[in-house]
Image: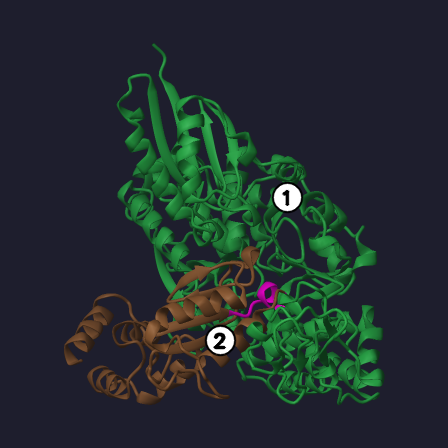
Amino acid sequence: MMNSLQTIVDKYRETEGNVITLLQDTQEAFGYIPREAVEYLSRTLDIAPSRFYGVATFYVQFHLKPRGKNIVTICCGTACHVKGSERLLNSATQELNLTEGRDMTEDGQFTLERVNCVGACSIAPVSLINKKVHGKATTEKLLKEIRAIKGPGDAKE
Amino acid sequence: MQKNNIEIRVCMGTGGIASGGAEVLDAFKREIEASGIRASVRENCSTHRVGCRGLCAKDVLVDVAINNEKVTYQYIKPDMVSRIVKEHVMENNPVTEWTVGEEYHSFHKKQIKVVLSDCGRLDPESIDDYIAANGYEAAKNIFKSWTPEQVIAEIKASGLRGRGGAGFPTGMKWELARANVNDDKYIICNADEGDPGAFMDRAVIEGNPHSVIEGMLIGAFAIGSRKGYVYIRAEYPLAVDRLRLAIREATERGFLGKKIFGTELDFEIVVKLGAGAFVCGEETALIASIEGQRGMPRAKPPFPVNKGLWQKPTVINNVETLANIPYIMRKGAEWFASYGTEKSKGTKVFALTGKIMNTGLIEVPMGITLREIIYDIGGGIEGGRKLKAVQTGGPSGGCIPADMLDLNVDYESLAKVGSIVGSGGMIVLNEDDCMVNMAKYFIQFTQEESCGKCVPCRVGTKRLLEIMERVTTGQGKESDLELLETLSASIKVTSLCGLGQTAPNPVLSTLKYFREEFEAHIRDKKCPAKVCKELIIYSVLEDACKGCGACLRACPAGAITGEKKKPHRIDPEICIRCGACFDVCKFKSIGRD
């Protein structure tokens, strides 16, 4: 961990970096913002941890907790909303056995997220599975994709 | 012997890629390689990826041009490619059953393309393509033989106004920044397209990134800046990649960097990734974000043209505004101003989405009527349903009812009816959409995105949302309508930035034009469009049910029971009212009340 953090610090010093770019690089490296990383950056660069957390909690991009191996994202932009994104969200929540307030499955295989808009409104509703855009999504297609990732072992209801 | 020139262009915008554009392009490359056509002395055959062509509803769109004779195909899948190569490319015999029809042509007929003129024609990942289309010519001329004042005068004469939403005259903004004497000035391209339902900026950057860079170059020359930033959403990975590549290519050619075009002038562009905050579309919040802070707006004045990034004079222009600049400078202010209305000049790109046949990206002269957009270009409402409203301007805009279709689309006319042009999202709603739900949707959005700095926005939008939630769940009170109006009015006048000042617009405009829908929710506890979950009950119409089991399989909650070929039943206690059964039933045997 320390090595990759040192690379991030070096890059920050070389380019005109700032707290946001530091956090973006940290998240790129670890998938989320680990507490130890913030402590290290804070110590090395003499920036108060509160500045990191202030920024990290302001922007939706940053995650303070680990995320699942597979990320399922449902676009909730206006066009997707009127074309039924809520149904996609509901069925994915059910399929992944997620309850209110939890967005990652217990086995850490999946994280379900919503995004404000990915700008693919003309093929709404849109879902993203591990960053790949699936246009004109339907509940059936979405569940099929999720089940395919789950693998045959989990296919039984 | 004259060589045949064969060009194949595959749409690889976001829509194109999601529909399989990359696979189609690969298939073409493979088939062409296999056909041996490249080895032939008579043929010169090339495949190209191009940006968004507009009509994403019919993706993947493919052009096959033989000696500039162009045929466009729609809905192309990789397995269709070999036939096109065999019959059309090899034997010059187009596969007519797959070519675009009348709709495609009428979609384009009333459009006038300025910003999008090269989108869908050029390979966005090739600077040579852009240069061959006269790209960077305007910037070069300007750097060598114009004065900044002349450039500003030309942009002022064109009447170009900010395309990000507010509509501030671009030339005037540049003039104000020019007048500020300072060694360091910045020009920022605002590509933080946060409006849900809008993707114009994304399409422009993905389709023709060099036009934005050239626009920034000309802007930098006009105001006297040596450094620019593009603040772009991280949610647009393809746009980010293409932009970075374009900046690299332009730097290699000496169009960016030191001593540009052999003059004494320097200009560099830095790409900054947004971290996901709608409020960062606001100028002062965007500046705070580039500086690495929480993206919170501050009071204006001082305006960014006086004190912006790092306290230096800063111009912030939207992507589409900047992409207009090279074309205006190439063809002249007079040409640009010949389109549009008296106060709204030129063209505007709109993202046409929702319940419309031809969803996609369109560019139309300002002042065109909504009717022309919806019916002539958009091809009318999906599924033969009735138009109810058009939502423009996203969370800061409003809903325009169907009986106002003859309204001209320009800054002034839309403002008059309580909406805005905004950045260009245009979402078409039909009779299946609940206007109260739409208003709630937008308030929920702005409430989540409120940065929390000022009380009217932070607390006010929260209270608005609570009222909207009451109304949509059948808990609304008669007095709520008045409360919505007075609360909205206070939020508008007392909020610090544009986000709060415009947040109540969706509520106010729906209250104004669709009051009866609010009343139905409050008085009758009914949602006329059958959208608000808490107000609908699903049941199986036993006479119509064939017992096919489709609903049973579709139900995510396991609320449906029944034997094969016998009428099924929905348990209202378990039903989560998602409507999945209603959607899958082929026999219209699911009832909603």
Residue A76 painted magenta: yes
Residue B19 pos. (x, y %)? 47, 51
Q: For the residue carrying disc 2, how many other residues have a C-alpha within 10 Å: few (<14), some (14-19), or many (20+)?
A: many
On screen, residue B259 versus residue B414, left or right, reads left
The answer to whether residue B298 shows anywhere in this view is no
Chain B painted colour? green
Please report contact status of discs 2 and 1: CB closer than 8 Å, yes or no. no
Q: Which chain is brown?
A: A
Distance from the alpha carbon under mark 2 to that under mark 1? 44 Å
Q: Amino acid at mark 2?
A: Ala
Residue, x 34% and y 78% (percent of image)? A109
Q: Nearer the viewer, residue B230 or B427?
A: B427
Residue A24 pos. (x, y %)? 32, 72
The answer to whether residue B57 shows anywhere in this view is yes
Callout 1: chain = B
Residue denoted by label 1: B346
Dot 1 lies on which element? loop
Q: Identify the disc placed on residue B152.
A: none
- Quadrant position of the N terminus of chain A in the picture: bottom left
Residue B49 painted magenta: no
On screen, residue B295 versus residue B462, left or right, reads left
For discs 2 and 1, the disc positioned in front in the rendered view: 2
Residue B420 pos. (x, y %)? 69, 61
- When asked about the image quadrant of residue B102, the answer is top right
Note whether B52 is above or below B279 in the view shown. Answer: above
On screen, residue B522 versus residue B172, left or right, reads right
Q: Which residues are magenta?
A: A75-82
Q: How many marks?
A: 2
- When asked about the image quadrant of residue A19, the answer is bottom left
Q: Identify the disc placed on residue A92.
A: 2
Q: For the residue carrying disc 1, how many other residues have a C-alpha within 10 Å: few (<14), some (14-19), or many (20+)?
A: many
Q: Amino acid at mark 1?
A: Gly
